[in-house]
């Protein structure tokens, strides 16, 4: 199962998103075999994204080769995040960037994620680890900066803007310096963390940080998609005072498409004309938050 993978390189990260797309990274300091590998057929064959373009608030950069990826993560928004070091041809490039999975496959421009501290943006400091928490919208990371105690330590993102803020000392172990932090999560949403070189395991009750999760909304809001399976269209019924704002259709390969809908009282009709057969996730943005439902198009 290594078609498309360089056989002399070691796999350093492996990730699978909710739609069955596999992602892998490989150790490479010369660009050969480096970059992001992805597979849409159960890891039988792989494609590689080794050269990219990413934009900041002021400029767009071309990366000729991705040498090393420190972290890779996918989230419920069908977005892939990477922290990397590479080459721009005659200069070194590093940073933390993100893109929709479909845009990554189409070789479109990535977006920089901003590490914010004291009014400065540390865009080029690679993160050591990522964790997207079940409490919707919150992400954790560790910034490894061996040359600067000001920028290192664990970071938290809660507002979905892509801007990270450092967790101060006392709230989570060592809040600065060159201490790497690794995160994990149990089925209740509790976050665990440990730092390299420390025998202690820390955890936090995330209820104080939690916003409404996808699972909670699916449990509370009574929503029905019918007919399911369907051929030409689907009705969406939402009980209660919940307004439907946007509908996205996500395929098993990670492709995302926005679909218009027609409102009629408590029901909405979504036309699926010319939509290929397959299994999809209907991503519905309501006035209360995000709701996900599976849909089979025959």
Image (tube, helix red, strand yellow):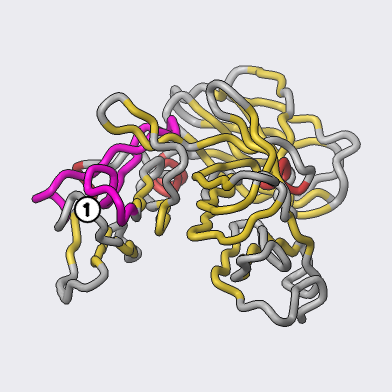
Say whether residue 222 is visible: yes
Q: Secondary structure at mark 1?
A: loop
- State left or right for residue 128 relative to residue 268: left
Nearest the camera: 45 or 25?
Answer: 25
In the image, what residue occupies the spot 50% across and 45% down?
Answer: 96
- State left or right for residue 224 relative to residue 229: left
Q: Main secondary structure of the magenta part?
A: loop
Q: Is residue 121 magenta?
A: no
Which contiguous range is marked in magenta?
Answer: 145-172
Res. 204 image quadrant: bottom left
How packed is label 1: few (under 14 Cα within 10 Å), some, or many (20 or more)? some
Percent of width and height locating residue 208 = 19, 42
Nearest the camera: 201 or 120?
Answer: 120
Percent of width and height locating residue 20 = 67, 62
The image quadrant where one finds the N terminus is: bottom right
- State left or right for residue 117 relative to residue 50: left
In the image, what residue occupies the spot 67% across and 65% down?
Answer: 30
In the image, what residue occupies the spot 49% across and 31% down?
Answer: 239
Nearest the camera: 93 or 296?
Answer: 93
Percent of width and height locating residue 122 = 39, 37
Q: Is residue 153 magenta?
A: yes
Mark 1 = which residue? 177
Res. 257 image quadrant: top right
In the image, what residue occupies the spot 45% across and 27% down?
Answer: 240
Figure check: 292 above or below 11: above
Percent of width and height locating residue 18 = 59, 57
Figure check: 40 above or below 55: below
Say whether residue 142 is visible: no
- State left or right for residue 219 relative to residue 282: left
């Amino acid at each position: 199962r290594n078609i498309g993978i360089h056989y002399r390189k070691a796999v350093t990260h492996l990730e699978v998103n909710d739609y069955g797309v596999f992602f892998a990274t490989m150790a490479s300091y010369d660009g050969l075999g480096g970059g992001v590998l992805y597979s849409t057929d159960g890891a039988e064959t792989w494609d590689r994204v080794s050269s990219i373009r990413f934009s900041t608030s002021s400029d767009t950069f071309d990366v000729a080769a991705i040498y090393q990826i420190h972290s890779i993560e996918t989230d419920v928004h069908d977005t892939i995040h990477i922290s990397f070091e590479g080459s721009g041809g005659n200069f070194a490039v590093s940073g933390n960037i993100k893109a929709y999975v479909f845009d990554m496959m189409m070789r479109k421009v990535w977006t920089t994620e901003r590490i914010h501290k004291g009014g400065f943006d540390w865009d080029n400091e690679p993160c050591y680890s990522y964790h997207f928490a079940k409490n919707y919208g919150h992400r954790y990371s560790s910034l490894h900066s061996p040359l600067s105690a000001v920028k290192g330590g664990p970071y938290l993102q809660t507002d979905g803007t892509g801007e990270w803020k450092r967790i101060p000392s006392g709230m989570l172990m060592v809040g600065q310096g060159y201490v790497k932090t690794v995160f994990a999560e149990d089925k209740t949403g509790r976050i665990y963390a440990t730092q390299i070189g420390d025998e202690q395991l820390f955890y936090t009750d995330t209820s104080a940080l939690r916003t409404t999760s996808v699972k909670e909304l699916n449990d509370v809001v009574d929503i029905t998609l019918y007919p399911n399976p369907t051929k030409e269209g689907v009705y969406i019924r939402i009980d209660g005072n919940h307004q439907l704002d946007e509908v996205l259709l996500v395929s098993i390969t990670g492709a995302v498409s926005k679909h218009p809908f027609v409102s009629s009282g408590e029901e909405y009709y979504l036309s699926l004309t010319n939509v290929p057969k397959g299994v999809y996730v209907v991503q519905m943005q309501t006035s209360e938050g995000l709701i996900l439902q599976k849909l089979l198009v025959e």
